[in-house]
Structure formats: structure tokens, C-alpha cells
Image: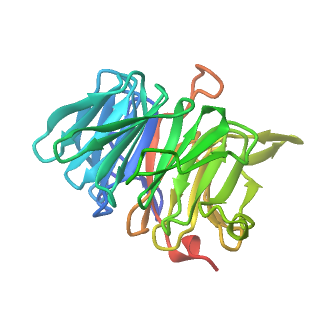
Amino acid sequence: MSVKTAMTGSNEYKLNQGPEDGISAVKFSPSTAQFLLVSSWDCTVRLFDVGGNSMRMKYQHTAPVLDCAFYDPTHSWSGGLDAQLKMHDLNTDQDTIVGTHDAPIRCVEYCPEVNVMVTGSWDRSVRLWDPRTPCNAGTFTQPEKVYTLSVAGDRLIVGTAGRRVLVWDLRNMGYVQQRRESSLKYQTRCIRAFPNKQGYVLSSIEGRVAVEYLDPSQEVQKKKYAFKCHRLKEEGIEHVYPVNAISFHSVHNTFATGGSDGFVNIWDPFNKKRLCQFHRYPTSIASLAFSNDGTMLAIASSYMHEKGDISHPEDAIFIRQVTDAETKPK
């Protein structure tokens, strides 16, 4: 650890040269816990060397960036309010505009099983992109604005406005496999698929999380449940916060949630219990990402304008080393 690292505890530190405005997404490299991509409302995507605590590179969009993803260890894809989908070569620092949506791009994900990039937009569509060419490989209308999406093997789970959830087969996008309604009463904020591909976790703006299964059979559907979280009693009044971020531990199938209460919790979905809660962070948790080996958790503490334009703590990314004691089902 270098001396200049701002330590918040022996197992956690703050990244240097972080974004200058709200943080929209943090994503670890698929191959190593060393590299982290960060997209921001400051119109940049940054690549960090996590171990060395330094920014390796940043590139610009013409407007705030809402999401980013690695295609492979040397290429990042990103999109946001300028509606442009960019591919960036992290070795040569070269940009390619791959294509556009008709409105801001909200989500960017990679599906390794089908080797396709997936974007979701407020233009009520999901678009697929062939990363080899790169070029558009199809546009698929959704019922409402896309708020969140996640890939489970060769299936795509899309969360839209109006509390709708759609399950698509990325190998056959001719029709929707399943049309669902969120089991939560309030607006969907985040969906993330289980690493074992059996289901997904969905969070809402009203301090609640649902654990859902993809198999539509009655027997499997009996296993689904929901629970309250990210709620704080302050002076006798219960405050309920949005659950903005979910990230799965790829080894243990446990998951972390982050809320506008500034807390990060780790949950064991099989035994239906909380494994741990970290200390309170300076402001809302906007995004979370476990490294692919499950040893690190990137935590974006970034005010999300829940209370409008007020003074707020600076945006920061914390890197936390996590242990099996915190992440493994007991």
C-alpha cells in the first residue's frame, strides 16, 4: 500500500483521482481485480489501477455517462445522456462510436455466452451489438423506458418503468420469453442475475428487495420472497431509502446491496439472512461491484440528488477487501 493512500480502515481505502461529479457505475475487469471502470456525470469514463491506487486513463463523452462495461480486458463500452454508444480501446486510447439510441442510454452489459453487447435506453428499446465488427445486431422494443438490465447465461432480464420485468432469450429475440410484473409495489431501481443463472434480485426505490426465480413452474416460484432493508429509525420516525445497487459474489452467490441511507449490506439469499453490514458511508451508495474473484468490493458513495441540489459530501469510490466471513453462507 502506498503512503499516499487515504485509508478508511486497514481493509479499505479511497481511490485517488475519482470523478468530479456523480458516479453512475463501477465495474471490475472480467479477468482481474486490478482494473476498475467508472462512469460519471462529469462526462468521463475512467480506468483505475486498483492495487496501485491510480487512474490509468480517462475518456470523454459529450454528456453525462450513465453506464459502462468491459467487453474484454482491453475494451470498454459506455453510454449515457448523449445517446451514443462508445467502444474504447484501453491499450491504444482510441474511441469508436459504435451506434446510437434515440434517447439516453441507461444500461450497458456484455453477454459472454452469446458474445454480444446489450444496451437499454429511455427510448423504450434494447439493442444488441456485435463487438467484433462492431455493429448493431438488432433493436427490440420494450413496453416502457429501460431502467435496468442483467444477463443470466443466454437470457436477458430487463426492468422498465411501470414495474415491468421482461425475460428475453438472447439467442432468439423474436419474442419475449416471459412478461412479469415486479413483486414490489414501487419503481424498480436495479436488477442483477444470480451467478448460477437460476434467478435474479430486484430492488425498488422503497427500501425493499425481491429474490426471484426464472423457472416459471409453480414448485420453483414458491421459493421467491421479498424483504425490507435500507430503512433507518431516526428520532422515532422510520425513514425508507431507495436500494440503488446490487452486486453478486460470483463464488458464493451471496449479494451486496447499497442504499441511499449510505449503508452496504451483504445477504445470504439461501438462508434468508443478512451476513453483515459495513460502516455508514458519507452519502448514498450509487453503485457496487464485486471483483470477479470475490476478494474486493468497489463502493461508489455518491449523492443522487434525492433531496435536490443541496450541498453534499464529495463523490468517492472506496475499495474494500472482503473476507469469506463477510460473504460466505454460514
The colour scheme of the drawn protein is rainbow
Apparent side of residue 98 relative to residue 13 in the rendered image (left or right): left
User: Which residue is most to the bottom?
Assistant: 330
In the rendered structure, the answer to whether residue 225 lies left or right of residue 268 reads right
**Residue 121: x, y in percent?**
45, 31
Where does the N terminus fall, quadrant-wise? Answer: bottom left
Quick check: 259 left or right of 286?
A: right
Q: Which residue is found at the position 26% from the left and 34% from the top?
A: 86
Confirm whether residue 246 shows in the render: no
Residue displayed at 52% across by 76% down:
324
The residue at the point 57 percent across, 67 percent down is: 254
Considering depth in this image, is 67 or 236 the residue closer to the camera?
A: 67
x, y (%) of residue 22?
46, 32
Placement of 26 over or under 224, stated as above or below: above
Quadrant holding the C terminus? bottom right
| Placement of 109 over or under 141, stated as above or below | below
